[in-house]
Image: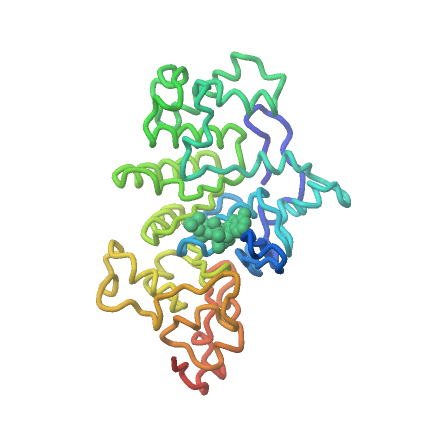
């Protein structure tokens, strides 16, 4: 259900029977920057996100995992309306986000309301906190912009209570400091408070724990999960590390989504996906994550035919993983598997999950 914001302003309208955010066939293709000598050539297109459909519900947790460059950040930013898709649609409570931005059709929820309901915390909070402002000033700004009628006392009260809620006690001690006077973990807590100020429906945590000391990572994930509960906020949590994605999804009662070259190749509850992967690429991530404490993890050779990751400018035909997949057969070069399985449950995009598929009569790829 949509709800009023932290200062009692009306809730965004939209339809409560619609998912919080719904992606349908989303593509994000970038034109690659041209070198000096390529000036007269057609620019290359990076297919950062390619044909992803996904629903995020209220109070939902989705942990996206995959190698660097597979499109996690681009998908995350598209989900919260920070990146315009080049194809497909992204809807918030039924309202097309980019139609709201462009004022096209009957706009039920204004773009500004959508953007303040969908927040982000970055890997490096230092770079998003103004070094010349005290923490209280940094946190006052978004309130002043969105709620100009809220007075100084109410503003301070809200800021102090949020700082305390994220573990910065006593709040008054931290509020008057500058960002450089805080540790990495404290800066990340400030970034989290800033995201929570608007009582958002969804927070994108983009590698938000990667720069923290290993000992602080679990603490930060636990804090986000506590807040998720308290504030009824959904989270899209991005990590290149399967064990962190597993922890977050498992403790948040959510799903892990595995990305490869701009596509989601497997999604499902963490335990199921890790114990019984439906896609050979998930098996590679499992192998590469020693602290999953699985027998297979880190043992022997990696479960791939080739180590090299293809260029997203020119991804392989058919199943994009076929150039590296140890199970690939000829049909995998020609046909693209779709995500199959229980909708909203465990799904994977591999012909091996279809007992009657012609994959089984096809010849193993030899190269
Ligand atoms: N603004 C942009 N212009 C051109 N290419 C881009 C742009 N943003 C991302 N890309 C490219 O899109 C692909 C996906 O990038 P993205 O940052 O989404 O991946 P990622 O999985 O989050 O990786 P990382 O963990 O390294 O950030 C990469 O090939 C990247 O170089």
Residue 60 is left or right of residue 116, and the answer is: left
The structure residue drawn at horizontal position 41% and vertical position 63%, both measured from the top left corner, is: 309
* Along the viewing direction, whichever of 231 and 45 lies nearer the viewer: 45
The structure residue drawn at horizontal position 34% and vertical position 58%, both measured from the top left corner, is: 271
Query: How is the model colour-coded?
Result: rainbow
Q: Is residue 181 above or below residue 15?
A: above
Residue 110 is left or right of residue 166, and the answer is: right
The structure residue drawn at horizontal position 41% and vertical position 53%, both measured from the top left corner, is: 68
Q: Is residue 141 above or below residue 238?
A: above
Q: Is residue 27 above or below residue 317?
A: above
| Residue 272, horizontal then vertical, whole percent | 37, 61
| Residue 312, horizontal then vertical, whole percent | 50, 61
The reply to whether residue 332 is visible in this rendering is yes
| Residue 186, quarter of the rendered image | top left
Q: Residue furthest right?
A: 105
* Along the viewing direction, whichever of 105 and 17 lies nearer the viewer: 105
* Along the viewing direction, whichever of 47 and 134 lies nearer the viewer: 47
* Along the viewing direction, whichever of 348 and 73 lies nearer the viewer: 73
Residue 73 is left or right of residue 249, and the answer is: right
Q: Quadrant of the C terminus?
A: bottom left
Label total for image: 0
The reply to whether residue 63 is visible in this rendering is no
Q: Is residue 43 above or below residue 348?
A: above
Q: Quadrant of the N terminus?
A: top right
| Residue 25, quarter of the rendered image | bottom right
| Residue 138, horizontal then vertical, whole percent | 48, 22
């Amino acid at each position: 259900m949509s709800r009023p914001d932290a200062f009692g302003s009306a809730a965004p309208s939209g339809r409560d029977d619609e998912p919080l955010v719904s992606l349908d066939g989303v593509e994000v293709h970038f034109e690659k920057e041209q070198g000096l000598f390529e000036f007269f050539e057609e620019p290359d297109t990076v297919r950062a996100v390619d044909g992803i459909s996904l629903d995020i519900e209220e109070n939902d947790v989705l942990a996206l995992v995959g190698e660097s460059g597979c499109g996690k950040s681009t998908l995350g930013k598209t989900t919260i309306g920070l990146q315009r898709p080049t194809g497909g649609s992204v809807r918030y409570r039924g309202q097309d986000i980019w139609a709201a931005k462009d004022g096209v059709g009957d706009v039920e929820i204004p773009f500004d309301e959508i953007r303040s309901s969908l927040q982000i915390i970055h890997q490096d909070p230092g770079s998003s906190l103004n070094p010349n402002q005290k923490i209280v000033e940094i946190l006052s700004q978004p309130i002043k912009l969105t709620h100009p009628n809220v007075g100084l006392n109410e503003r301070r009260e809200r800021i102090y209570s949020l700082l305390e809620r994220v573990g910065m006690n006593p709040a008054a001690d931290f509020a008057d400091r500058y960002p450089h006077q805080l540790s990495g973990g404290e800066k990340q807590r400030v970034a989290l408070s800033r995201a929570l100020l608007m009582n958002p429906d969804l927070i994108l945590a983009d590698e938000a724990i990667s720069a923290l000391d290993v000992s602080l990572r679990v603490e930060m994930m636990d804090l986000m999960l506590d807040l998720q509960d308290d504030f009824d906020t959904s989270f899209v949590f991005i990590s290149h590390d399967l064990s962190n994605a597993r922890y977050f999804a498992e403790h948040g009662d959510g799903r892990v989504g595995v990305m490869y070259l701009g596509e989601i190749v497997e999604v499902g509850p963490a335990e199921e996906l890790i114990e019984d992967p439906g896609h050979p690429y998930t098996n590679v991530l499992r192998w590469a994550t020693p602290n999953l404490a699985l027998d297979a993890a880190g043992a022997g050779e990696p479960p791939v035919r080739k180590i090299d990751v293809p260029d997203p400018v020119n991804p392989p035909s058919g199943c994009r993983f076929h150039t590296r997949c140890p199970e690939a057969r000829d049909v995998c070069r020609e046909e693209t598997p779709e995500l199959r399985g229980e909708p909203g449950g465990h799904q994977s995009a591999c012909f091996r999950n279809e007992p009657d598929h012609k994959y089984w009569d096809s010849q193993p790829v030899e190269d």
